[in-house]
Image (cartoon, grey):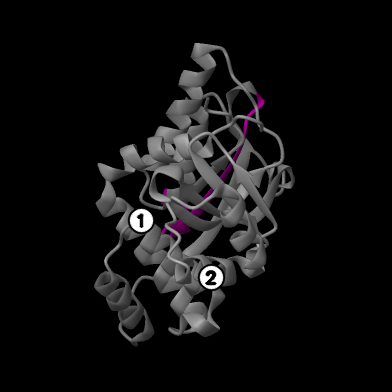
Amino acid sequence: MSGHSKFANIKHKKEKNDAAKGKIFTIIGREIAVAVKEGGPDPSNNFKLATVIAKAKANNMPNDTIERGIKKAAGDGSGANYESITYEGYGPGGTAIIVRTLTDNKNRTAADVRAAFTKGGGNIGTPGCVSFMFDEKGQIIIDKEECDMDPDDLMMEVLDAGAEDFKEEEDSYEVITDPAAFQEVEEALKAKGIPMAEAEVTMIPQNYVTLTDEGVIGQLNRILDMLDASDDVQNVYHNWNEE
């Protein structure tokens, strides 16, 4: 992964997502609702909710919108019951793809995901067929342009906060944590005033696949674009090195 800039990928994704910020907020709103129903409205006692709140703030969701979503989910109103379903499969060029969804209509979601894989030259596999190629980790990205700390000082702050690893990339710093320590590290960096461009528990590939054939790249992008267009899709993880 040497020289691989994940922040460049994130900026690319955010440029696409900025045009669909309403969808991002809808997605996060669903995650808040599910997290509250599963573990209650107090993020200090609900790790999943705390993680979603960190993601919401990283995507610039207003605090009042977050609070409103928590209160709504904590009420007894009749809302949609969302089910979490994960799909795994292979894209063109031997790429591995994990798709996490939240849906109130399993048939609709399955059809959307299957269509994306099929039209992009991929195929859906059985549960676990590619997830073993990924590690679940807390990941915090710090934009170098927004952080004026000395890299060595920043590394010490990060490791003292409980992070597993600290890497310097071309345009960013990457902080890796155990999922269980993610909230503690994120709060510690926030308390120090360290700006975070991205903060979430994610699936990180153990190895990346580099594609050179433009046709194959086009097919994979079709899968990713179609998945991105589905309101039921929460997260898509893949091992394509998008350099």
Residue 82 seen in render: no
- Residue 6 appears left or right of 136: left
| SS category of the residue bearing label 1 | loop
Query: Cβ–Cβ below 8 Å for labels 1 and 2?
Result: no
Residue at mark 1 to residue at mark 2: CA–CA distance? 19 Å
Residue 185 seen in render: yes
How would you rate the neighbour count of disc 1 (Cα within 10 Å): few for under 14, some for 14-19, many for 20 or more?
some
Please give the residue where the numbered disc 2 appears in the rendered image. 188
Residue 201 shows which numbered tag? none
* The image quarter in which residue 184 lies: bottom right
The front one of 114 and 43 is 43
Q: Considering only order in the chain, which callout, 2 or 1, is on the residue closer to the N terminus?
A: 1
Residue at the image position 54 percent from the left and 17 percent from the top: 216
Q: Which residues are magenta?
A: 94-108
| SS category of the residue bearing label 2 | helix
Q: Amino acid at mark 2?
A: Ala
Please give the residue where the numbered disc 1 appears in the rendered image. 59
Q: Amino acid at mark 1?
A: Asn
